[in-house]
Amino acid sequence: MDKTRRFLLGSIPAAMALATLPGRSGAQTAAMPPDEILQDWYRLILELVRHTATYSPPVASRAFAYVGITAYEAAIIGQAGPRSLAGQLPGLTAVPSPVGQAELDPSVILQAALQTSVSHFFWNTGPTGQRAMGAMGRKLAEAAAVGVPADVAQRSSALGTAIAEHVIAWSRDDGGDRIENMGFPLTWEFQSGPEHWVPTSLVSQQQAPLLPRWGWNRAFAMPDGSSCGLPPPPAYSEEPGSDFYNEAYEVYDTVRNLTPEQTLIARFWSDDPMLSPTPPGHWISIALEVMAEDNLPVEQQADVLARLGITLADAFIACWRSKFEFDLLRPVTYINRVIDAKWQPILITPPFPEYPSGHSTQSGAAAEVLTGLLGADRAFGDATHEADGLPVRQFANFWQAANEAGISRLYGGIHFRAAIERGLEQGRCVGAYALALETLA
C-alpha cells in the first residue's frame, strides 16, 4: 500500500492532512472513484475506534456492521444484479431508491452515505475526531463532485444521505444504540460459587462486567444470540490432574516460559481498546489491505465490508450470550487462588467472563467470511500494527491468522484453551450465516 493509502494509520490528526495530499487539490480533473472514497472513510473509522473511549470491541463491531451495510446499499444503487440486504436482515426494510431516470453519480452517493453514517455512529468521539470527520467529509465531498453537474451532485448527495438515515433509523432499537457508563452497569449481582467471574481490575468502574446484556441485542445474519451456542466449559475443579486444573496449569506454565515469538504474538493480537482499532478493527484492517492490493471493484469491496461487519457484530452477540450464560472466572483468578498467588498474565485481563474467548469467536467468524469471499489460499501480510512499531506478520490464509489470534490469548494469560478452541468453532458457525446472505450476482 502506498503512502497516500497508509497515512491514516498513525493517528486521527493525520486525517487532517487529507486536504494537502498530492492529487487531491482543487486542480483535480476527474472525480475521485468510489473505491478510494470507501477506503479513505474506513481508514478514518479505524482511528476513530482507537480514540473513542466507549468503543469497546462489541460496540466497535456494531458500528462496523451498520457502516458496512450502508456502504453496500449505496454502492449497488441503480444496478440490476446485486441484491439488497433489505428483507434479509431482521427489520431492515427497502432502502431509498432513485426516482425516475434522472442521472446520478456513484461517488457522490457513496460519499454522502458514508459521511452521514460515520458522523452518526461516531457522534461521541472527541473534538479531534470530530474535526477529522469534518475535514474528511469536506474534502471527499469536493473530490467526489469534480466534473459532476450541480444538479446531479445534489440529487446524488440527497440519495446517499437518505440511504444512511434509513439504516440509522433501523439501528436505533437493536439494544446497543446508547451506551451508559462506558458499558458497565452501576449495580451487579454476582453469582455464588468459586467457578464464577469476579473482577480482576482495581478500576472502580470495572467492578461490574462490561455490557452484560449485549448477547441479547438484535442479531444481523444469525437468528439470535443463541444460534451458535456452545457446550459448557470443562467442569470446575481445584483437584490437580482434573481437566480444569490442567487447562489452568497450561496457562500458568506457558506464560512463565514464553518464547520471544509467543510474546510477540500475544502483543500483536492484544488489540486493546484506546490503544488499537480493537479486535474487530484488526480484521477490518486486514480486509482493507487485501482488497486494495487486489484492486477489487467498489461493489465487491462494499460487499466484503458489509458481510465482514455483520459477522463481527454477530460474533460478539453470540460470544457475549455464552459468556454470561456460563459466567466463568478468568485464569488469573484461578491461578492466584489455587496454583501461585504471585502469578500475573502479560496482557491485561478484560473485565468480563472468560468463556468463550471473544477474539477467538470473532476471528473465526472473520476467517470464515473472508475465506468464502476472498479465497482459501489468499496469503497476506498483516500491517495493522506497523505504525505502532510491531512488524508485519505474514499468513498463508485467513484461518492461519485466526488460529494465531486465538492462541495469542493463551500466550497472553487471559484465556483457557477450551475458550479458544470453542470460540473459533463458534465463529465458524456465526460466519456461515453471513456467507449465506445473497448480495452480488
Image (cartoon, rainbow, N blue to C red):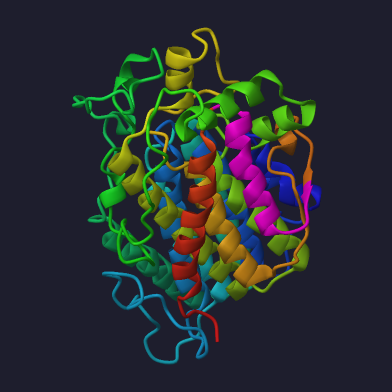
Q: How many circles with numbers are drawn on the protein?
A: 0
The verdict on residue 410 being magenta is yes
Front-most of residues 266 and 307:
266
Q: Position of residue 8 (x, y in %)?
A: 66, 43
Q: Could you tell me which residue is drawn at 41 percent across and 59 percent down?
A: 66
What secondary structure predominates along the stretch shown in magenta? helix
Q: Is residue 355 within the magenta segment?
A: no
Depth check, front residue: 407 or 377: 407
Give the magenta range.
394-413
* Residue 50 pos. (x, y %): 53, 36
Residue 116 visible in the picture: no
Q: Residue at the location (33% across, 22% down)? A: 198
Residue 40: % across, % down: 62, 54
Which of the 4 quarters of the picture holds residue 220? bottom left
Viewer-side residue, 383 vs 367: 367
87 lies above or below 383? below
Position of 253 relative to 418 (above/below): above
Rendered location of residue 137, percent (x, y): 52, 52
Quarter-wise, where is residue 310 in the image? bottom left
The residue lying at 74 percent from left, 37 percent from top is 386
